Image (tube, rainbow, N blue to C red):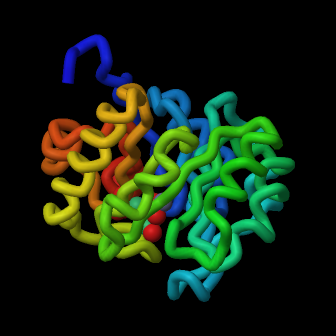
Protein backbone atom coordinates (compact mmCIF):
# COMPACT_ATOMS: atom_id res chain seq x y z
CA UNK A 1 0.00 0.00 0.00
CA UNK A 2 1.35 3.43 -0.87
CA UNK A 3 1.74 5.64 2.15
CA UNK A 4 -0.62 8.40 1.00
CA UNK A 5 -3.40 5.85 0.58
CA UNK A 6 -3.13 4.49 4.10
CA UNK A 7 -6.06 5.68 6.21
CA UNK A 8 -5.37 7.43 9.47
CA UNK A 9 -5.09 5.20 12.54
CA UNK A 10 -7.72 5.96 15.16
CA UNK A 11 -8.53 4.59 18.61
CA UNK A 12 -12.04 3.79 19.82
CA UNK A 13 -12.26 2.90 23.53
CA UNK A 14 -15.06 0.40 24.21
CA UNK A 15 -17.24 1.58 27.06
CA UNK A 16 -18.13 -2.06 27.78
CA UNK A 17 -15.10 -2.09 30.08
CA UNK A 18 -16.09 1.09 31.90
CA UNK A 19 -17.91 1.63 35.21
CA UNK A 20 -21.54 1.90 34.04
CA UNK A 21 -22.53 3.67 37.25
CA UNK A 22 -20.34 6.60 36.14
CA UNK A 23 -20.69 6.38 32.39
CA UNK A 24 -20.68 10.11 31.59
CA UNK A 25 -17.54 10.68 33.61
CA UNK A 26 -15.84 7.62 32.06
CA UNK A 27 -16.65 8.87 28.55
CA UNK A 28 -15.32 12.35 29.29
CA UNK A 29 -12.11 10.83 30.67
CA UNK A 30 -11.58 8.91 27.41
CA UNK A 31 -12.17 12.07 25.39
CA UNK A 32 -9.66 13.98 27.48
CA UNK A 33 -7.17 11.11 27.11
CA UNK A 34 -7.25 11.57 23.33
CA UNK A 35 -9.73 8.96 22.07
CA UNK A 36 -10.89 9.46 18.48
CA UNK A 37 -14.37 8.01 19.03
CA UNK A 38 -16.25 5.93 21.57
CA UNK A 39 -17.23 2.33 20.81
CA UNK A 40 -20.63 1.30 22.19
CA UNK A 41 -21.40 -2.44 22.36
CA UNK A 42 -25.06 -3.35 22.04
CA UNK A 43 -25.96 -6.98 22.81
CA UNK A 44 -29.39 -8.60 22.72
CA UNK A 45 -28.84 -11.83 24.68
CA UNK A 46 -29.72 -13.72 21.51
CA UNK A 47 -27.18 -12.97 18.81
CA UNK A 48 -24.61 -13.14 21.61
CA UNK A 49 -25.00 -14.64 25.10
CA UNK A 50 -24.89 -11.30 26.91
CA UNK A 51 -26.97 -8.14 27.40
CA UNK A 52 -25.74 -4.58 27.55
CA UNK A 53 -27.63 -1.40 26.72
CA UNK A 54 -30.20 0.24 24.46
CA UNK A 55 -30.72 3.59 22.71
CA UNK A 56 -31.68 5.28 26.00
CA UNK A 57 -28.15 4.85 27.32
CA UNK A 58 -26.65 6.20 24.09
CA UNK A 59 -28.90 9.27 24.47
CA UNK A 60 -27.57 9.75 28.00
CA UNK A 61 -23.93 9.53 26.89
CA UNK A 62 -24.32 11.86 23.92
CA UNK A 63 -24.19 15.23 25.74
CA UNK A 64 -21.09 14.23 27.73
CA UNK A 65 -18.66 14.12 24.78
CA UNK A 66 -18.09 15.64 21.37
CA UNK A 67 -16.52 12.40 20.14
CA UNK A 68 -18.31 10.39 17.46
CA UNK A 69 -20.19 7.38 18.83
CA UNK A 70 -19.43 4.09 17.06
CA UNK A 71 -22.35 1.79 17.83
CA UNK A 72 -21.70 -1.95 17.35
CA UNK A 73 -24.99 -3.83 17.12
CA UNK A 74 -24.68 -7.48 18.18
CA UNK A 75 -28.34 -8.09 17.43
CA UNK A 76 -30.21 -10.81 15.55
CA UNK A 77 -32.50 -8.12 14.02
CA UNK A 78 -30.41 -4.93 13.76
CA UNK A 79 -32.89 -3.34 11.33
CA UNK A 80 -35.45 -3.13 14.16
CA UNK A 81 -33.28 -0.87 16.31
CA UNK A 82 -30.80 0.89 14.01
CA UNK A 83 -32.89 4.05 13.53
CA UNK A 84 -33.46 4.39 17.28
CA UNK A 85 -29.69 4.38 17.85
CA UNK A 86 -29.25 7.03 15.16
CA UNK A 87 -31.91 9.20 16.82
CA UNK A 88 -30.13 8.66 20.14
CA UNK A 89 -26.91 10.09 18.71
CA UNK A 90 -24.93 7.33 16.97
CA UNK A 91 -22.52 8.60 14.28
CA UNK A 92 -21.57 5.17 12.95
CA UNK A 93 -23.69 2.04 13.15
CA UNK A 94 -22.19 -1.37 12.45
CA UNK A 95 -24.02 -4.70 12.41
CA UNK A 96 -23.16 -8.30 11.71
CA UNK A 97 -23.31 -9.93 8.28
CA UNK A 98 -24.46 -13.06 10.15
CA UNK A 99 -27.58 -11.28 11.44
CA UNK A 100 -30.98 -12.18 10.04
CA UNK A 101 -31.35 -9.03 7.98
CA UNK A 102 -30.87 -7.68 4.45
CA UNK A 103 -27.40 -6.22 4.97
CA UNK A 104 -27.44 -4.16 1.75
CA UNK A 105 -30.83 -2.63 2.53
CA UNK A 106 -29.74 -1.66 6.03
CA UNK A 107 -26.60 0.04 4.67
CA UNK A 108 -28.82 2.14 2.40
CA UNK A 109 -31.27 2.92 5.21
CA UNK A 110 -28.49 4.06 7.53
CA UNK A 111 -26.95 6.25 4.82
CA UNK A 112 -30.37 7.79 4.22
CA UNK A 113 -30.44 8.66 7.94
CA UNK A 114 -27.14 10.48 7.48
CA UNK A 115 -24.75 8.25 9.44
CA UNK A 116 -21.78 6.06 8.60
CA UNK A 117 -22.61 2.39 8.26
CA UNK A 118 -20.60 -0.80 8.27
CA UNK A 119 -20.49 -4.55 8.51
CA UNK A 120 -19.00 -6.80 11.15
CA UNK A 121 -17.68 -10.35 10.76
CA UNK A 122 -17.56 -12.98 13.49
CA UNK A 123 -14.32 -14.98 13.67
CA UNK A 124 -15.81 -17.92 11.73
CA UNK A 125 -17.08 -15.74 8.86
CA UNK A 126 -14.74 -15.46 5.86
CA UNK A 127 -13.59 -12.12 4.41
CA UNK A 128 -15.47 -12.84 1.18
CA UNK A 129 -18.80 -12.43 3.03
CA UNK A 130 -18.41 -8.64 2.89
CA UNK A 131 -16.87 -8.33 -0.59
CA UNK A 132 -20.20 -7.73 -2.39
CA UNK A 133 -20.90 -4.75 -0.08
CA UNK A 134 -17.40 -3.30 0.12
CA UNK A 135 -18.13 -0.49 -2.33
CA UNK A 136 -21.04 0.77 -0.17
CA UNK A 137 -19.76 0.25 3.38
CA UNK A 138 -17.93 3.03 5.25
CA UNK A 139 -16.28 0.54 7.57
CA UNK A 140 -15.75 -3.20 7.89
CA UNK A 141 -15.07 -4.53 11.35
CA UNK A 142 -13.23 -7.80 11.91
CA UNK A 143 -13.97 -9.41 15.29
CA UNK A 144 -10.68 -10.58 16.72
CA UNK A 145 -12.48 -12.41 19.56
CA UNK A 146 -15.87 -14.15 19.67
CA UNK A 147 -18.36 -11.31 20.26
CA UNK A 148 -20.15 -11.13 23.60
CA UNK A 149 -17.60 -10.26 26.24
CA UNK A 150 -14.66 -7.96 26.86
CA UNK A 151 -11.30 -9.09 28.14
CA UNK A 152 -10.80 -12.07 25.82
CA UNK A 153 -7.61 -13.17 24.11
CA UNK A 154 -6.84 -11.84 20.63
CA UNK A 155 -7.14 -14.40 17.81
CA UNK A 156 -4.06 -14.10 15.54
CA UNK A 157 -5.81 -16.30 12.95
CA UNK A 158 -7.87 -13.19 12.05
CA UNK A 159 -4.82 -11.36 10.63
CA UNK A 160 -5.09 -12.89 7.12
CA UNK A 161 -8.78 -11.90 7.05
CA UNK A 162 -7.87 -8.26 7.75
CA UNK A 163 -5.24 -8.41 5.00
CA UNK A 164 -7.70 -9.97 2.54
CA UNK A 165 -10.27 -7.22 3.13
CA UNK A 166 -7.62 -4.50 2.81
CA UNK A 167 -6.40 -6.08 -0.46
CA UNK A 168 -9.94 -6.25 -1.86
CA UNK A 169 -10.61 -2.64 -0.83
CA UNK A 170 -7.46 -1.62 -2.73
CA UNK A 171 -8.50 -3.68 -5.73
CA UNK A 172 -11.91 -2.00 -6.02
CA UNK A 173 -10.45 1.49 -5.60
CA UNK A 174 -11.35 2.13 -1.97
CA UNK A 175 -7.91 2.36 -0.32
CA UNK A 176 -9.25 4.60 2.44
CA UNK A 177 -11.95 2.13 3.62
CA UNK A 178 -11.93 1.97 7.41
CA UNK A 179 -11.04 -1.49 8.63
CA UNK A 180 -11.86 -1.79 12.32
CA UNK A 181 -10.71 -4.51 14.70
CA UNK A 182 -12.50 -5.42 17.91
CA UNK A 183 -11.37 -7.74 20.68
CA UNK A 184 -8.13 -8.31 22.56
CA UNK A 185 -6.44 -5.21 21.14
CA UNK A 186 -3.60 -4.00 23.37
CA UNK A 187 0.06 -3.00 23.09
CA UNK A 188 1.05 -6.57 22.24
CA UNK A 189 -1.38 -6.94 19.31
CA UNK A 190 -1.72 -3.43 17.87
CA UNK A 191 1.34 -3.67 15.63
CA UNK A 192 0.17 -6.89 13.97
CA UNK A 193 -3.34 -5.63 13.20
CA UNK A 194 -2.07 -2.34 11.78
CA UNK A 195 0.48 -4.15 9.63
CA UNK A 196 -2.30 -6.42 8.35
CA UNK A 197 -4.31 -3.36 7.28
CA UNK A 198 -6.55 -2.31 10.16
CA UNK A 199 -6.76 1.43 10.95
CA UNK A 200 -9.59 1.72 13.46
CA UNK A 201 -8.75 0.06 16.74
CA UNK A 202 -11.31 -0.78 19.43
CA UNK A 203 -9.91 -1.41 22.88
CA UNK A 204 -11.88 -2.04 26.06
CA UNK A 205 -10.01 -3.63 28.92
CA UNK A 206 -6.60 -2.39 27.71
CA UNK A 207 -7.75 1.24 28.08
CA UNK A 208 -10.36 1.26 30.84
CA UNK A 209 -8.30 -1.19 32.87
CA UNK A 210 -5.27 1.09 32.64
C1 LIG B 1 -16.95 -7.80 22.41
C2 LIG B 1 -17.07 -6.34 22.10
C3 LIG B 1 -15.82 -5.57 22.23
C4 LIG B 1 -15.21 -5.54 23.62
C5 LIG B 1 -13.73 -5.46 23.43
O1 LIG B 1 -18.08 -8.45 21.96
O2 LIG B 1 -17.53 -6.16 20.78
O3 LIG B 1 -15.99 -4.23 21.75
O4 LIG B 1 -15.64 -4.47 24.39
O5 LIG B 1 -13.15 -5.59 24.67
P1 LIG B 1 -11.60 -5.92 24.86
O6 LIG B 1 -10.82 -4.82 24.24
O7 LIG B 1 -11.46 -6.01 26.33
O8 LIG B 1 -11.34 -7.25 24.16
ZN1 LIG C 1 -17.57 -4.11 19.92
Closer to us: 165 or 188: 165
* 76 over 121 or under it: above or below: below
Residue 17 showing in the rendered view: no
Q: Image point 69% across, 68% down: which residue?
A: 78
- The quadrant of the picture occupied by the N terminus is top left
Residue drawn at x 80%, y 41% is 112
Q: Is residue 52 above or below residue 181?
A: below
Q: Nearer the viewer, residue 159 or 164?
A: 164
Q: Position of residue 189 (x, y in %)?
A: 17, 50
User: Is residue 117 something that shows in the picture?
Assistant: yes
Report the side of 193 relative to 126 (left or right). Answer: left
**Residue in the image at 21% along x and 46% along y:** 163
Viewer-closest of 11 and 15: 11
In the image: residue 116, left or right of residue 171 = right
Res 77 quadrant in image: bottom right
Q: Determine which quarter of the picture holds residue 29.
A: top right
In this view, the residue in front, 177 or 183, is 177
Task: Say which residue appears at 72% left-offset and 39% top-offset.
Answer: 115
Quadrant containing ligand 1: bottom left
Q: Position of residue 168 (x, y in %)?
A: 31, 42
Query: Looking at the picture, how far across and down is residue 56, in whole percent?
Result: 82, 61
Count up the numbered dots: 0
Amino acid sequence: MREEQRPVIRIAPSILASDFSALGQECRAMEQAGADMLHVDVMDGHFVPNLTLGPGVVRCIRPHVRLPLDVHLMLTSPERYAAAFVQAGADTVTYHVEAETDAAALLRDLHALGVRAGLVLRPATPAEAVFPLLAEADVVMVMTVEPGFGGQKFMPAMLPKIAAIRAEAQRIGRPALDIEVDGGIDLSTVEDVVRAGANLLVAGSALFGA
